[in-house]
Amino acid sequence: MPQIIVLPHHEICPAGAAVEAESGQTVCEVLLKNHIDIEHACEMSCACTTCHVVVREGFDSLSDADELEEDYLDKAWGLEPESRLSCQAVVGAQPLVVEIPRYTINHASEKH
């Protein structure tokens, strides 16, 4: 069973975490199942960027991003070449190291 290491995030996971993942699950599903409350405003339907993660290790072992995911990623805050929407990134057999960006673009939670 592959492991996902989550690098420390100031609010969501201050100490970082290492969790077990089942191949075939999305990164978002694994994190939520392990009480790492990553934002997912669209309920994992690939309609926003709030679950954006940067895959620091193991990027090539994930399922390929489709055109819709790529279009949304273009709108993500802090986009990097190894960025993925965690609701679309399906875990393979290799361990992963992921970083949750400091900010998200979430119009539902913005204060005016």
Image (cartoon, helix red, strand yellow):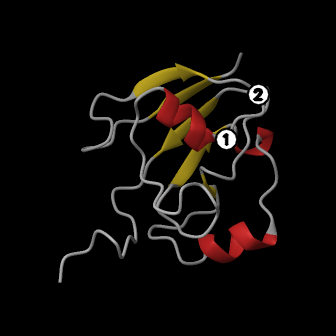
Q: What residue occupies the far left of the structure in this picture?
A: 112
Residue drawn at point x = 78 percent, y = 33 percent: 24
Q: Is residue 29 left or right of residue 18?
A: right
- Counting from the top left corner in percent of width and height, residue 95 is at 67, 26
The C terminus lies in quadrant: bottom left
Q: What residue occupies the far top of the structure in this picture?
A: 1
Q: Which mark is residue 11?
A: none
Q: Nearer the viewer, residue 14 or 39?
A: 39
Up/down of 43 relative to 26, above or below? below
Task: Please give the count of numbered marks on the rendered protein.
Answer: 2
- Counting from the top left corner in percent of width and height, residue 8 is at 34, 36
Q: Nearer the viewer, residue 20 or 98?
A: 20
Q: Is residue 80 left or right of residue 67?
A: left
Residue drawn at point x = 44 percent, y = 48 percent: 100
Q: Label 2, on which residue?
A: 23
Up/down of 36 relative to 100, above or below? above
The amino acid type of the residue labelled 2 equals Ser
Q: CA distance from mark 2 to mark 1?
A: 8 Å
Q: Is residue 105 left or right of residue 23?
A: left
Q: Nearer the viewer, residue 65 or 44?
A: 44
Q: Quadrant of residue 21?
A: top right
Up/down of 79 relative to 18, above or below? below
Q: Label 1, on which residue?
A: 26
Q: Secondary structure at mark 2?
A: loop
Residue drawn at point x = 46 percent, y = 33 percent: 6
How many residues crowd mark 1 within 10 Å: few (<14), some (14–19), many (20+)?
many
Residue drawn at point x = 62 percent, y = 73 percent: 72
- Counting from the top left corner in percent of width and height, residue 45 is at 64, 60
Q: Secondary structure at mark 1?
A: loop
